[in-house]
Image (cartoon, rainbow, N blue to C red):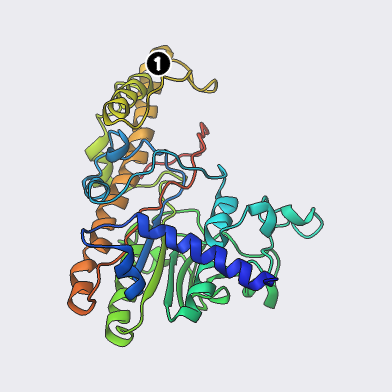
Amino acid sequence: MKNGFNQCRELLVLTVACFLFSYHGAGVTFAAVQKKQPNVLLIMVDDMGFSDIGCYGGEVDTPNLDRLAAGGLRFTQFYNTGRCWPTRAALMTGRYPHDVGHAMMFGRDAPRAYRGTTKEQALMIPEVLKPLGYRTYHVGKWHLHNRGKGAEAAASWPLGRGFDRSYCVKRQDNFFNPKIMLDEHHVIKRPGDQDADYYITRAFTDRTLHYLDEHQAYHRDEPFFLYLAHTAPHFPLHALPEDVARFRERYRVGWDVIRQQRLQRMQKMGILKAKLSSRDPDAVAWESLTAAEQDEWSGRMAVHAAMIYRIDVETARAEGMKEAWNKWAKEQQVLPWAALKKWAPVYSKDYRMK
């Protein structure tokens, strides 16, 4: 009978193998993948509705993601847990979040499934890939650390879970100046204080390109797995002014019209064959809002769209590294857009525009 380690390892190898069916670029065959281990760049976003982006019927300009989707595969059935850490736990371990202690993060006094402490025997993707010769990199959000302090908590951050390098947001409260970043083992507080142009979505891509350049220079004969986990478009709603301006007028028609237009596009694309669902009970009819309220809410939607648009722009920068990869890699690279983590509508007053 196989032990738990081998069972976890086989399950995660299967999870990673699923990436092969979400590739960009012609000429990738399963036989080719078996012959040469592929490089994998997994991109994830936070709190984005699946119909926000253009290739799923959204009105947000995402030409680069649309191009990747046109050359790859789009899922029309996809499940997540509807919350942050359980979805990430399932993605990284290939197991149900309850099984690995991340159904919630209530601490050590909670039932085992709800403590927010990942089991040591719950191997994560980089821990499975490293014995296969992979270099592993993490950029962005993690949210799978064990609560508390000391060695046990430190070992639960990316560098303790199999990643060779990591640029991680530890405390996110401002896209222009996050509270705490972890650059490998170094704590950086308020990086925007030193860099007036700092914007975290752009900074994540900068670090991604740095790691890929470094890999090409020093580890070109080894395959890599790079997990780029954006915090956008999670609240607070912070976007670059020039990106907001691009969408400022687009949402003045209101969410009722936007919903209908999205459904029509999804039906035309063959993604959905359903009728429009009832409006969220916490959202009133757009026409019932005052002019000032409509201006405020259309602005918020514009900022949300601008954050997604910036992800698309930055994805093009990361994907552009493919040209450099092809100079030293004989096989095509795997570039999955495994981005549809979760969606939780929030109607609070905490949204901010800059």
Picture coordinates of residue 38, whole percent (x, y)? 34, 70
Q: On the picture, is 62 further left or further right than 110? A: left
Question: In the rendered view, would you say 352 is above or below 335?
Answer: above
Q: On the picture, is 276 further left or further right than 104? A: left
Where disc 1 sits, the SS reads: loop
Question: In the rendered view, would you say 26 is above or below 78?
Answer: below
Q: Residue at x 20, y 73 (%)?
A: 326
Q: Is residue 179 visible?
A: no
- Quarter of the picture holding the C terminus: top left
- Quarter of the picture holding the N terminus: bottom right
Q: Residue at x 57, y 70 (%)?
A: 9
Q: Nearer the viewer, residue 308 or 323?
A: 323
Q: Mark 1 highlights which residue?
A: 290
Q: On the picture, is 77 further left or further right than 218? A: right
Question: In the rendered view, would you say 189 is above or below 345?
Answer: below
Picture coordinates of residue 150, whole percent (x, y)? 70, 75
